[in-house]
């Protein structure tokens, strides 16, 4: 008879919030240490991936609980398409129309957009950050909120987005970084709505592409 598998743990709900905050601070500290080093731009994205994976393996937690399962990544195409059409397209159109009145708006011609930059942004920014924030942090915050009887998707998305914005501000203290709370709120909602990371990751990538194309 084979030995029984060790029980899956979700971690103590009491400490889930502290874990989420501590992991965010640890990631920010690691990013700061890597900034300016020869391989910082390559190693920094790994920080967002290694911390969640270490937590999941050490805590014997379910990958599904954090949206890491491959099956979960295949979901969310409809939500991604709708969010892009309903949010990013109107946003881009409004900015272009208001461009003459806004300083720093210089839309880039499609032919001048470098596909390599877009690919690197997906691999080095969108995917690692979503694994960390909408995967790992989102999962820990869900446990903490559920232990207090709170199962509201908006509250959960807002809590995750607050840490998302705080991390960006700690890495680079500017108001633009703080403004990522707004898209972070939508990405958190997409994560909870679809049960996976495809929709928030895709939206993150497309939002970054639109932001870069508008040359803020």
Image (cartoon, rainbow, N blue to C red):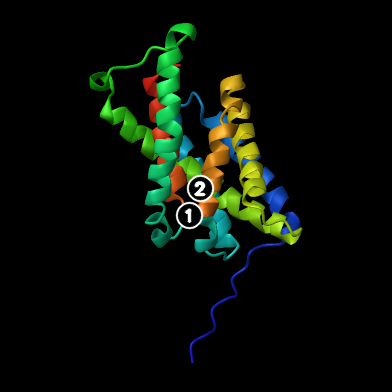
Measure how far apart labels 1 and 2 are at the Cα level. Answer: 6 Å
Percent coordinates x, y for residue 174 in the rendering: 60, 20
Q: Residue at x 37, y 37 (%)?
A: 122
Q: Which residue is mark 1?
A: 194
Query: In screen coordinates, is 135 left or right of 157?
Result: left
Query: In screen coordinates, is 2 left or right of 115?
Result: right
In which image quadrant can residue 8 be found?
Answer: bottom right
Q: Could you say whether the residue bearing mark 1 is in a helix, strand or loop?
A: helix
Q: Is residue 215 visible in this depiction of the protein?
A: no
Q: Residue at x 62, y 22 (%)?
A: 173
Please state which of residues 52 and 196 is positioned toward the viewer in this rendering.
196
Checking the image for residue 65, the label placed there is: none
Percent coordinates x, y for residue 76 in the rendering: 41, 52
Q: Residues within 10 Å of mark 2 (few under 14, many from 20)?
A: many
Q: Is residue 180 visible in this depiction of the protein?
A: yes
Percent coordinates x, y for residue 214 in the rendering: 40, 19
Whether residues under marks 1 and 2 lie with C-beta atoms below 8 angstroms apart, the answer is yes
Please state which of residues 118 and 90 is positioned toward the viewer in this rendering.
90
Percent coordinates x, y for residue 37 in the rendering: 47, 26
In which image quadrant can residue 110 be found?
Answer: top left
Is 155 rendered above or below residue 88?
Answer: below
Q: Residue at x 60, y 75 (%)?
A: 7
Q: Residues within 10 Å of mark 1 (few under 14, many from 20)?
A: many
Q: How many marks?
A: 2
Q: Could you say whether the residue bearing mark 2 is in a helix, strand or loop?
A: helix
Is 139 rendered above or below residue 8?
Answer: above
The residue lying furthest to the left in this view is 111
Q: Which residue is mark 2?
A: 190
Is 57 rendered above or below residue 130?
Answer: below
């Amino acid at each position: 008879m084979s030995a029984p598998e060790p029980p899956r743990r979700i971690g103590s709900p009491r400490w889930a919030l502290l874990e989420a905050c501590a992991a965010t601070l640890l990631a920010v500290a690691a990013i700061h240490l890597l900034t300016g080093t020869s391989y910082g731009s390559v190693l920094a994205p790994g920080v967002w991936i290694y911390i969640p994976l270490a937590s999941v393996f050490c805590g014997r937690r379910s990958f599904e609980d954090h949206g890491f399962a491959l099956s979960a990544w295949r979901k969310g195409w409809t939500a991604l398409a709708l969010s892009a059409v309903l949010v990013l397209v109107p946003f881009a159109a409004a900015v272009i129309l208001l461009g003459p009145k806004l300083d720093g708006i210089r839309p880039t011609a499609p032919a001048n957009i470098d596909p390599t930059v877009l690919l690197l942004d997906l691999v080095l920014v969108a995917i690692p950050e979503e694994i960390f924030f909408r995967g790992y942090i989102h999962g820990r915050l869900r446990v903490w909120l559920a232990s207090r009887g709170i199962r509201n998707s908006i509250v959960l998305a807002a809590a995750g987005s607050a840490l998302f914005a705080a991390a960006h501000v700690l890495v680079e203290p500017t108001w633009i970084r703080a403004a990522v709370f707004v898209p972070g709120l939508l990405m958190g909602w997409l994560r909870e709505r679809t049960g996976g990371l495809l929709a928030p990751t895709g939206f993150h990538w497309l939002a970054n592409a639109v932001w870069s194309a508008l040359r803020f």
